[in-house]
Amino acid sequence: MTRTESDRTVADIVVERLRAWGIPRVFGHPGEGVALIVEALHRAGGDPAFVPSRQEEAAGFMASGHARYTGGVGVALATQGPAALHLLGGLYDAKLDGKPVVAIIGQQTFSALGSAYQEIELPRLFADVCSQFLRVAAVPEQVPYLLDQAIRTAVATRSPTCVVVPHDLLDQVVPDGLPHPDGGGVIAAAPGLPPTRVVPHEQDLGAAAQLLSAGQRVAILVGQGGYGAADEIMQLADRLDAGVATSLLGKPVLDERLPYHTGVLGQVGTAASAQLMAGCDTLLMIGTNDPWTSYYPMPGQATAVQIDIDGSRLASRYPIDVPLIGDARETLRALLAQVPQRRNRDWRDMVEAAVDRARIECDARAEAPTERLNPRLVLRELSPRLPGDSSVAVDVGSVTYWYARHLQLPPGVRAHICGTLASAGSALPYAIAAKLARPDEPVFALLGDGAIQAGGLAELITVAQRWPEWPDPRFVVLVLNNADRGGRGGEPERGPATEPVLAVGAEPDRPAGPGLPSPEQVRAGDIPYAGWARLLGMHGIRVDRPEQVGAAWEEAIAADRPTLIEAMVDSAIPLEPPEQPFADLRGLSAGGVAEGAGPAAVRGRAQTLREHAAQGADLV
């Protein structure tokens, strides 16, 4: 059949279904297997828009980032072979943190299957990460239905899904109305999924209210599932005189200036949160799956209530007496109607005193003199300057520690991190997705030098190409440059969900592996990150002294274009987990660093000893 310009193809149908669902943009990298979809997106005039990344891995993280910052469905596009492999990181990120993402994957033409050229068994490859829905289209009539089901399932299950479309199917002409297949069943296609209201049964709410009311020392742990329920959480905390901690993903949910807000829990968190958990007799978990169970109350210490929309997560981290399946906001409103006001100022006073001590300690550590710039100071100086309508993207590495402890988020700021997968290189794609979703609001990306080398240098090209379209050009990238790409002293080699990466003090230097430069070969300035930004037409600032930090943030926020701040920070600052209550500190002065440790480890141990001594700790 001869093609005409007015003919609709399966590629056009793909674009039409995405538009019917209100998908605003598709993230991907052009390739032969999806070239027809890219052409159809261009013909559609930007509805949806196509956002090309430098590589498919970034496209996957952009799609996950879009889901995080908007609450909508992220869509990623990739062709077969290595392109499909690169997409996996972003899809696993979405799976582990419960975000709706749809992957549309191109495949070899049917006639080429079996030839082994760029051929990967796509259904098997994606079977785990897209376990909720994964289908390969075989005829044009399937395509609208498969896309509808993929999007609907992604939303309903808060997970990634996948549709594979062979290249030769995309080019087939389809008539208006897409008739049903001959001799087959009816295939219905209809976009839309109405929101639901999920509230626990009354008897379960009553049991939870009774348990919480009986508690004398109540602690509340808030995760990302608490988004939108800040008012209800604060009301319940005041009614019970409770202290509140958050998971790393839940950090933006509540105003961190609250006097009873102890901060983030876990290895990257605060001593106040560890003390809150160690002293409580009642625990309320709201929308959290925080993996640092060693910082939870001891099993048997506290009675517990957990609220989560996903029943599979109930009691997965701590023994639960009353599990509640429901939306956090709706469930908390129902609980408030049954929980009476109960004063326990002794407990609340203890919590607030711990918060005050933790904040004083954070300030002292940020002000502590270091050989190079103190990275804690860099994050602390952003706190009073961070606009309330900002979006913040945080990468994996030492920057995670400084963000968790030293950046105080004002109410309304949207902040996200690759929390469960803990993949370095995710923050810049997140930030791009956040900026495209709200181009009239500022965005901040916080990275280490290792993370920006993991794809970030390339994706700065995406920023350079797109920023002239933004009504608000503020897009600030912080790179903490400790000249330590190999993970010694600054960048953890494992994600924040694992055991402590560095022992108290610092980890001994390791010899460089094959092809890796030694510490002596790596020196600050070898990779001029700020210079790279200027080369791309953006603004670049390099800071290496404490008095420059505040001015650098103000200059970046006032700039008329995206800005990269390169902070030359000390790699020896120890990434200490918060001390457990009554921790014995004597190990710091005896055998704290292994024999043969390198200079960064020795300086890290010395820095720790100085800080503990300044706080009056007995190290003898």
Image: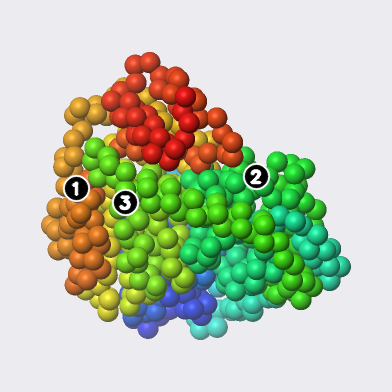
Residue 377's label in the rendered image is: 3
User: Between 517 and 345, which is closer to the camera in this rendering?
Assistant: 345
Q: Is residue 160 above or below residue 46?
A: above
| Marks 1 and 2, how far apart at CA | 39 Å
When the figure is inspected, residue 202 is found, relative to residue 87, above or below; the finding is: below
Q: Residues within 10 Å of mark 3 (few under 14, many from 20)?
A: many
Task: Residue 73: tell me if it is visible.
Answer: no
The colour mode here is rainbow
Provide residue 322's location: percent of width, then percent of height: 80, 57
Q: Nearer the viewer, residue 445 or 619?
A: 619
Question: For residue 338, which quarter of the picture?
Answer: bottom right
Q: Is residue 259 above or below residue 317?
A: below
Which residue, given by chain and number where applicable, does mark 1 sit on?
Answer: 544
> Mark number for residue 71?
none
- Going 33% across and 26% down the picture, which residue do you hit? 602
Residue drawn at 55 percent across, 54 percent down: 353
Answer with the quarter of the image where residue 225 lies: bottom right
Q: Which residue is mark 2?
A: 278
Structural crowding at the residue carrying mark 2, measured as other residues with C-alpha within 10 Å and reported as few (<14), some (14–19) or many (≥20): some
Q: Who's the residue at 43% across and 48% down the image? A: 361
